[in-house]
Amino acid sequence: PFILRRTKEQVAKDLPDKTESILWCSMHAHQKMVYDEISEQIRSNIFSDIKDKGLGKSKLAVLQGIMKLRQVCNTPLLLPIEEQQNCKESIKTEMLLNELQNILGAHKAIVFSQFSSMLDLLSAECDKKGISYFHFDGQTPPAKRAEMVAAFQNEVSETHLFLISLKAGNTGLTLTAADYVFLFDPWWNTAIEQQAIDRTHRIGQTKNVFAYKLICKDTIEEKIIQLQLRKKKLAEELVTEDDGFVKSLTEEDVAYLFG
């Protein structure tokens, strides 16, 4: 029933600064159209479920609805083919690649995504741009992960980008060679997000660390950020809050998320 811990601030007081910011993304017309149409469908279905079954029995539908809208924010290509509406636009991918092209060479960067299929799409875009990268997710064997981490940490390595799935790479890694971190699709589990960022911001880091969350404006992602702030105390008290956060949603919260 008890957890004993020392915070990083207590044991590593000489660490360089860490700056966390939001990169706001505004969807282009086609992607926004797909988002609005799917949002309307989900909103109608969820509110109908809640009316018929009550919120308690509709939590899974709420979670699935949130997940689908987050996928559209990343790119409609994550949806089933029949729902993509031939839309290949991804404002986040566009902005991320612009940022990477500006910093890679002088800096090393890590990109985290919760969706392994999103990392595959980003890998393909990096190939088109001639950007060298390492990439692993939950399916990558431990020995291969260790090999890539060692290569990335090597000062003479010419590969300055690491694509990592959020949960596969949020603990047990030291990646202090990087000083830029991008959370491609932030989730409300702030503990996992911080653990991911802190793969770089830990003992051994000598440079200031810059961490960015890519958030689509006027979407459920922006509302999740606001809801995080409202429920900050709950998020801080839970060790792993994925289930706790969903269970804590009220009908008012759901109306806000999908309104």
Image (tube, rainbow, N blue to C red):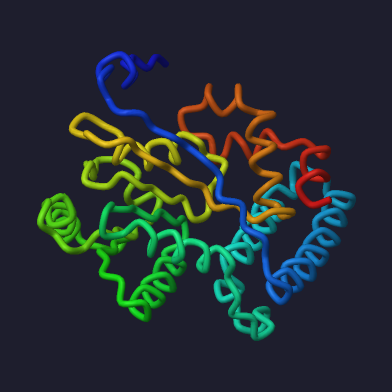
Q: x, y percentage for residue 155?
A: 12, 51
178 or 219, which lies in front? 178
In the displayed structure image, the side of residue 197 where residue 21 appears, left or right: right
Q: x, y percentage for residue 19?
A: 44, 35
In the displayed structure image, the side of residue 103 where residue 214 appears, left or right: right
Q: Is residue 138 visible?
A: no
248 or 35, which lies in front? 35
9 or 167, which lies in front? 9
Q: x, y percentage for residue 153?
A: 16, 50
Which picture quadrant has residue 28? bottom right
Which picture quadrant has residue 173? top left
- Vertically, is 100 above or below 240? below
- At 77% from the left and 39% from the top, the residue drawn is 253
- Vertically, is 126 above or below 105? below
Q: Is residue 117 visible?
A: yes
89 or 136, which lies in front? 89
